[in-house]
Amino acid sequence: MDDLSNPKEPLVQFLRKVVHMSVRILAVLMTLVILWGVADVILVLYQELKAPPVMMLTISDILALFGAFMAVLIAIEILINIIIYLREDVIHLKIVMATALMAIARKIIIMDFTKISSDYVLAVGVVALAMSVGYWLVVIKDNKEGKVKYFNKDKQGRNTK
């Protein structure tokens, strides 16, 4: 029987190449999704500003635009996760959790409280709190392990170390 835990095993090497190529394809596709999202935000903003009353946005228009902006930012965060995975072949928990926090923040920002139940709001709040505490714990752990680098800054704001 072949030893699949051995990184030099031909099957393991082949599977790693397949996964690596798949992740590269996903990175290209995510870039296209981001460009499409930016184009969509521009189009929606143009249409909203052109519609009567001209050059005016309602609160619901602004919230819809915030949601679209946040969706593009989440896609960018996912692309960053993919790029880091391609570079280091590791999934960084802190970045994934930050992406999840951004997604839950987007959900909260675009919530229409007149159309959802209080149970739903409570559940989203619990998820946001749990993700925040989890992220905080990961940051604390990284600080203790010295994974977070702090830089001293001079009066002009430049890094000195």
Image (tube, rainbow, N blue to C red):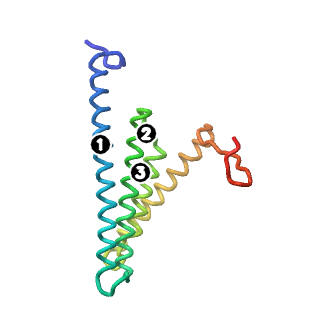
Residue located at (33% from left, 66% from top) = 41
Q: Amino acid at mark 2?
A: Ile
Seen in the image, is 29 located left or right of residue 160? left
Judging by the rendered image, the residue that carries numbered circle 1 is 26
Report how many numbered discs are placed on residues in the image. 3
The reply to whether the C-beta atoms of the residues labelled 1 and 2 are less than 8 Å apart is no
Q: Quadrant of the C terminus?
A: top right
Residue at image position (70%, 44%) is 160
* Front-lying residue, 124 or 152: 152
Can you give x and y, in whole percent of width and height, for residue 85 in the image? Answer: 40, 37
- Image quadrant for the N terminus? top left
| Mark 2 or mark 3, earlier in chain | 3
> Which of these two is toward me, 75 or 159?
159
Tell me where residue 102 appears, x and y as whole percent. 43, 58
- Residue 26 placed where, x, y %? 29, 42
The residue where tag 2 is placed is: 84
Q: Which residue is mark 3?
A: 77
- Dot 1 alpha-carbon crowd within 10 angstroms: few under 14, some 14 to 19, many 20 or more: some
CA distance for labels 1 and 2: 13 Å
Outermost residue toward the bottom in this view: 53
The answer to which image quadrant residue 7 occupies is top left
